[in-house]
Amino acid sequence: MLQELSIGHSHKRTIRIAVSALFFLTGFCFASWASRVSAIQQKLHLSEGLLGFVLIAPPIGSMISMFVAGRLVNKYGSRQVLMVAGLLYGGILPTLGLVDSLWQLFSCLILFGFCGNVANIAVNTQAVQVEAMYGRPIMASFHGLWSTAGLTGGFIGSRMAANGIVPYQHFLCIMVIMIIIVGISIRYVIPQDMSAGEKHEDQPLFVFPKGILLMLGIIAFCSMICEGTMFEWSSVYFRKVIGVNEAQAVQSLTAFMSTMALFRFLSDKLTIRLGATRMLQLSGLLTAGGLLIAVLMPYYNIAIIGFLLVGAGVSAVVPLVYSAAGRSKVLSPGMALASVSTIGYLGFLAGPPLIGFIAEATSLRISFFVIALMGTCIAIMSNKVKE
């Protein structure tokens, strides 16, 4: 169990609020870009195929950053890295609205994905230490704010588009907000990373996880395959298998995202009651069960319930995995998070194309059944995670 560090309650709360604000900002920045993809596609006259090509740029940038993010955090500290990466993340955003060619957009998106993931590793390193201060699980609440920011950013983006505000103007507003909030919040986060062991200064740029860290990475991989599938294929599944219109199909993604956000705010208390191992087992069973419901009973109302269960199931997995990785005695928190999240993120990238390949060879329902097995794997492997 975590041991509560000696620090004043009001000071702890201030630090938690500051880190929470930065979590929200990272999700808000990404959602702001995602909400205007269609407008940028129209501006650059991109076909569906070219847009699909462009959209692999942020994951490429994120994957590149995995090999340096942990080292940067270990060397300079999560506070310094978070400040620089957060400002760059917001600063690159307006350029996405200014580009006038496919390759300019592709290049900017690689930088956008790179800075976003470096900020992600740094802010999660801060979160691990805040959790140690409280002496109880609070990681999921931080990730809940990221999910809430995604919904908020998407809503604001839709309103900006409805009022005829072009992406550049929209993104410029977001950049200004980010600069202000980063400038204020960064003063109150943990100034110097706390490590229970040695400084790990001789660690290489990237360390492939072993032992329990590898197990945590595989659990994250299984969960993020399910997440990637939900984000990219949920509406397609509802259109082609359930047989609903476009508006109803979009509600499947909304159902998934809503329960994922909601249960991230509830899962910390559930983890305290059940323990990390049982919570991960429950998460895996909810994920598998929800997908199986949608596969075995392909009717709109029942499948929506299934997707609600999937959102609840995946909500706690990544926060619990990150929390456990950040307490590693083998690597520094930043290095451990980077190595585990690399494996997890591969699942997020692999899920959508895997669905496509399996669906092409068999059917969409069978491909979702295969993804349901990933939830079962989470439940089975969770007994390896220490409380």
Image: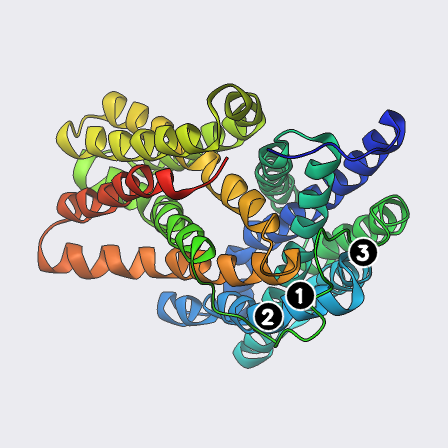
| Quadrant hosting residue 10 | top right
| Quadrant hosting residue 146 | top right
Image-based side of 292 in relation to 89, left or right: left
Image-based side of 17 in relation to 360, left or right: right
Name the mark on residue 169.
none
Where does residue 330 sit, x and y in percent of width and height? 58, 59
Name the mark on residue 65.
2
Residue at 61 percent of width and 76 percent of height: 205
Determine contact: label 1, label 3, CB under 8 Å.
no
Q: How is the image coloured?
A: rainbow
Circle 1 Cα neighbour tier, 10 Å, few/some/many (<14 / 14–19 / ≥20):
many
For the question of whether residue 15 can be seen, the reply is yes
Outermost left residue: 362
Eye-nearest disc, 3 or 2: 3
Residue at 78 percent of width and 55 percent of height: 175
Circle 2 Cα neighbour tier, 10 Å, few/some/many (<14 / 14–19 / ≥20):
many
Tag 1 residue:
115
Give, as a three-letter code, the residue at label 2.
Answer: Ser
Label 1 vs 2, first from the N-terminus = 2
Count how many numbered circles sit on residues in the image: 3
Tag 3 residue:
79
Q: Quadrant of the N terminus?
A: top right
Image-based side of 281 in relation to 178, left or right: left
Label 1 vs 3, first from the N-terminus = 3
